[in-house]
Image (cartoon, rainbow, N blue to C red):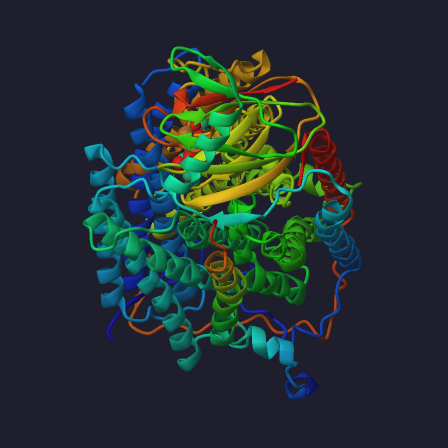
Amino acid sequence: MADQEERIPVMQKWLDNPFLLVFLGVAMPTVLYIVWGVMEIANIPVAR
Amino acid sequence: MATTYRICPRSGLQFDTAAEKLMRFHAVAGVLALLVGGIMALGVILTRWPAIKLLPADTFYMVLTAHGIDMLIFWIIFFEMAVLIFASSTLLRCRLAMPKLAWVASILMVIGAIMTNVAIFQGESSVMFTSYVPMQAKPHFYLGLILFAVGALLICFIFLGTLVVAKAEKTYEGSIPLVTFGALTACIIAIFTIASGAIILIPTFLWSLGYIREIDSLMYRVVWWGLGHSSQQINVSAHVAIWYAIAAIVFGAKPMSEKVSRTAFFLYILFLQLASAHHLLSDPGLSSEWKIVNTSYFMYFAVLASMIHGMTVPGAIEQAQRLKGYNKGLFEWLRKAPWGNPAFSSMFLSLIGFGFLGGISGVMMGAEQLNMLIHNTIYVPGHFHATVVIGTTLAFMGLTYFLVPVLFKREVLFPGFAKIQPYLFGLAMYVVALVMMGAGTLGVSRRHWDMAFAGAPMAYEWPGAAYLMMGLTGIFSCIAIVGGAGWILQIVLSILFGKKLEEGELRSTPIPLTLPAPTTGSKVHPPATPGTMVLALIFLTAFILYYFVNWKYLSSLWGLS
Amino acid sequence: MSAILPPSERVWWNQPIDKLEFIWIAIAFVWSLTMFGMMIWWHIYGNQNLANETYKTTKEMFAAKAQAVVDQYTVRTETDKQVPVVKPPAGSDIYLIGRLWDWWPIYELEKGKTYKLHLSAMDYMHGFSLQPQNINIQVHPNYDHVVKITPTQAGTYSIVCNEYCGIGHHTMVGRMYVK
Ligand code: HEM
Ligand SMILES: [Cu+2]
Ligand SMILES: [Cu+2]
């Protein structure tokens, strides 16, 4: 049972945590796609 | 909460009775949506087939709106809800969290679906499933979509709640199964998708009621595609999870590496949704930096993930088959696969078609500059019929062959037809996708009633090859519709009249999972997978060639800067 | 049936990766970066990059600018609808209006010369689809999208509308000449 003592690696712990994943999966596209995109549109200059 | 559990004698799976009813409900609702969408497909294709041109323009656009919505949104998302419930409560062997709320959500979804369909068929909401502003539909068109989305969002939360329940009640040990992890990926993407939908559809609904004066068309397109494209990414995650599930069910295949497959899903969680930008590459006002970062899923990390899944699923099958002794040469494992088992053949056709047709074309047209070549042409529906019909729909159909005896406790009728159905529907759809892409490469527009431009003062004449491609689209679409209608008929009749199968034992407490002992002691080295590697390299070669052919084509256009 | 069961090893993260699987991941990774680099490379060395120059505008303002060019450079009219054919000087700003259901006006351009083509819509969105070149650009109302174009082959071109814009969508075809 040496296996039982082996510590669980950080990455495995992260992947086992659904709420961390929910956070990352919502935050990434919200920031990179929606917020960045909307900011670009808001900053389009006005024609003269 | 008092519920009961049923152990299915055919699969050994344990179903929470409340969850089981919900799954059946969503599967049936999905199939009904597919039926409506399929009838609409007939109207669409018989009109786009230049030799037939069945419907008048207004009916055509109404029918096309219904086809898009009933297929892409209602059929797929209803079925996905069933998959989420299955992957949580059934695979984790636990009770479903909040079953009453789940029913409220399901009823909301049905009301929403009916409301939107009513709006469409009343005829004044022929705005396509994208409902781009400033073209306006009736308010109940948007309201129906909003109600549907709220219901779906609630079920996503119930999925997460069920993960919590399973963990708290210790119905499994260690990490969740890979298939559940894939479903979790789908659920996470769904949450972002539905949130984007809410951000844009609620104001649009208010605008249709007259409370808001104007909605900016560019803003609408950016946020709407957060819904429209990400929902396709729910499908990708869901059908990849189903590929793994079917490989496990049919072959007892073990993932080549939990680490690699889960990391690939993790890349999906992080980057897949950025691809919503695919639809905005030929739009004004967004910088190339934004376009490149988003369209490439950061740096094609989600393509990397798909290429990983595309290898590890057949790789796992190859390993399982080789362990069973199908060891001759490169491909005995594949030749001796159960090609007559519709769950397997659907899954394999789905995998190959999704990769070769949907994947390669999608990455090509997702390159910032190349997009100009095909934007809004019928290449686009060609591409997504390879992803969402061959990839997702066919995978769902395959899974259903497994679910009829297990979940509906009925024997599948007409087993002879079941054997050929995946080929009939799947291979015909391969051709449909290809010839639509062919016509699109020649420039033919999508969502277009008449490629001869009847009544236009300065009509353009498409090359003969374009007419040929559209004619072929017509012929092969009809074959695919026969395959699809046959599937619906077969499944519905089986559920209603198939031989009743044994229920299995009903219990009041769940049996927790017992795992086979870890294999650490006697480590059998899993066999290598040269056959899969050869397939993967063929894929890569096709990918590279096609990709650069299109850059060559682009370089022959007028200068643009 | 193990993809539908929890992993059999408690610590699966440390399990070794199959050699072929690893090689494939490495190849796929290199290919991913290549494709990413390709888009950037094309911005530097390629001749077909869609400009991002865009202004917020109004329908009235854009229509007035188009009208000014038409008034100044019209050489003849075509069809029953008297669509003006406009021959602007090389290098100038030219304005193309998309509206239900035509593209207005018709431009006559010189081969090898560069023009600043402004695109905007008067009502719904429309789709600029130049045939048989096959250049496709989304056209929005209230946005002025400035695309520098350099026609490289002479001929008569059609501008098909390929964004669904209502019942007359299929009649929305314009024209462009390159001499
Ligand atoms: C045999 C079955 C099917 C046939 C023959 C078929 C045929 C077509 C054709 C020809 C178009 C393009 C029409 C146009 O742009 O003018 C189209 C559009 C579309 N199809 Fe299908 N289809 C089938 C099944 C499906 C399924 C299963 C799905 C989704 C899961 C689907 C989703 C869509 C969507 C979203 C559109 C776009 C509608 C739009 O442009 O607004 N189709 N279909
Ligand atoms: Cu138009
Ligand atoms: Cu149009």
* Residue at the outermost front position: C72
**Near-viewer residue (B277 or B1):** B277
Residue B110 can be seen, yes or no:
no
Above or below B221: residue B35: above
Above or below B443: residue B532: below
Above or below A27: residue C78: above
**Near-viewer residue (B26 or B125):** B125
Residue C161, position in %: x, y? Answer: 46, 28
**Which of the 4 image quadrants contains residue B202?**
bottom left
Residue B278, position in %: x, y? Answer: 55, 47
Say which quadrant the N terminus of chain B sits in: bottom left
Q: Is residue C178 left or right of residue B536?
A: left
Number of marks present in the image shown: 0
Quarter of the picture for ligand 1? top left
Residue at 72%, 36% (x, y): give it.
B551
Above or below C178: residue B132: below
**Near-viewer residue (B274 or A48):** A48
Residue C34 can be seen, yes or no:
yes
Residue B364, position in %: x, y? Answer: 64, 40
Q: Is residue B477 left or right of residue A4?
A: left
Residue at 55%, 77% (x, y): give it.
B174
Say which quadrant the C terminus of chain B sits in: top right
**Near-viewer residue (B128 or B162):** B128
Q: Is residue C35 left or right of residue B204?
A: right
**Which of the 4 image quadrants contains residue C108?**
top right
